[in-house]
Amino acid sequence: MTIAKNIMDIPCPCGSGKLYPECCGIRKKVVSLEQARWRKTGRDLRRKLGEFAEEPEFIVEAGHAQDLYFSSLDEDFIDDDFTMERCFEWFIFDYLMIDRRTLVEAYYELPDLDYYEKALLSEWVNSKISLYEVLKVFPKKSLIIQDIVTGQQFHVRDASVASEIEIGNILLMRVLKVGDEYEFSTSGLALPAAAKPFLVFKIHDDIHELFKQRNSVEPLSWNKYLQARSHVINRWVVDIGLYSGLPDIYGHNAVKESPFNAVNLSEQDLEALLEDIKQYISFEMVEKTVPVINSKIKQENKQQYGKLIGKKTIKKGVGVLRLDVEDVFKWAKPIYAEVAKKLVDILYKQGYDFSQQEGAVRMWHDFCSKEKPTFRKASTWTATLVYAIARLGLDKKVHQSKLAKDYGVASSTISNNFRSLCRVLDLVAFDHRYFTQESPLTELKEVDPLLAEILENLRL
């Protein structure tokens, strides 16, 4: 697992020369029309998910979910509106129904969703409630938070939360990706910084206990752990807030004292607990969410920067969703759609995520719209596109000769088609139109700007 470093002290990747928090980290006054559309879709989608969860077919499931969620809470809070809201949100995103699906997964399978809704849902189905430490607050704008276990960081746009909390507070929240931004799913719980050792201690012991109960020696999935135990973690947070002697987020001291205060760990002890947790947990779903510079990279010889280039950036694991090419794109000819379907089948089986599938198909759709190619065998262009996707990320492990053999086409056909694709679309390495993952050039710009600029304009 790669744990993100502190993003508050890095130069802004836009090249302004300023630090990230003073530049792109600040909420912009001008928002693109595209991002405005993502925001509106996100708001509408939350409302639609709520309405979907209230459908009669889910009444029994909702009742079971409430029984499970409230079984660990103080009875005085069962009728609290805030708690009911959080329970309802948990039911939508985390509760496994009898068919082993979450409600948000069931909603994703509806036939009439548009491209923007599907793109958001492809991210949201893997979003779990977690515990975050507040690293930076931009008053009445946004905040930077870090998962206390994984180290994953998010820059979240939320003016109301940024007005109420302080650096060091611990938040129990769900973070949702909305276009190029991140937002909180619903209201959350906040604790003072002093609660962090106790929560890490509880997670450590809970994971150890669950691991002993399993027959498998394979690590637990962090996402699955959070999904299975989020209601339990919620109970810990509520109990700390109600019954501990910790100061609340406004600095007032509570009257009651309790065993929560007994967990007094040094920084070294805390790090040791976190390292031990990582021996039992798999973090395959964790990604860096903002450009992060690893200080070790700066100390290495520039000869090694080539290792950054050609890296196959795919996300594998449970939760990979398949793109519906005819739902998202309109095709001038049936054979164009046939190529797109075959391409998605290949990418899906190899573990490429929804956005990567969409980027690849968009490249093919743009080419068809401009060039209107004529051909008889779909496999000739499927092989070409697989090769093009590899070249887009400068992956040298994929060869035309191997693809030609696998798909029963001539190497010269793949070569000619690829040259045509590059010419019509003017493709460059890590082309932002079709390469949807974080470009390795982001890190390279910090250590060798000239080489990064050359590669950024490298024609394929």
Image (spheres, helix red, strand yellow):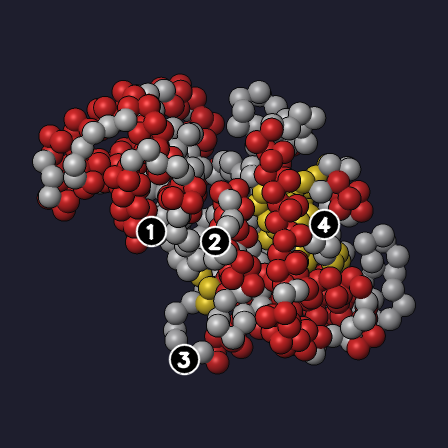
Snapshot quadrant of residue 139: top right
Q: Calculate the distance from the C-alpha at mark 1 to the C-alpha at mark 4.
A: 40 Å
Q: Calculate the distance from the C-alpha at mark 2 to the C-alpha at mark 3.
A: 39 Å
Q: Calculate the distance from the C-alpha at mark 4 to the C-alpha at mark 3.
A: 38 Å
Residue 215 marker: 3
State the SS at label 4: loop
Residue drawn at 60 percent across, 35 percent down: 37
Q: Calculate the distance from the C-alpha at mark 1 to the C-alpha at mark 3.
A: 30 Å
Circle nearer the N terminus (2, 4): 2
Residue drawn at 28 percent across, 40 percent down: 334
Snapshot quadrant of residue 91: bottom right
Q: Is residue 350 above or below residue 293?
A: below
Tell me whether the residue at label 2 lies in contact with that at label 4, contact meaning CB atoms closer than 8 angstroms.
no
Comparing labels 2 and 3, the label whose residue is closer to the camera? 2
Tell me whether the residue at label 1 lies in contact with that at label 3, contact meaning CB atoms closer than 8 angstroms.
no
Residue annotated with mark 4:
168
Residue 329 marker: none
Residue drawn at 70 percent across, 26 percent down: 29
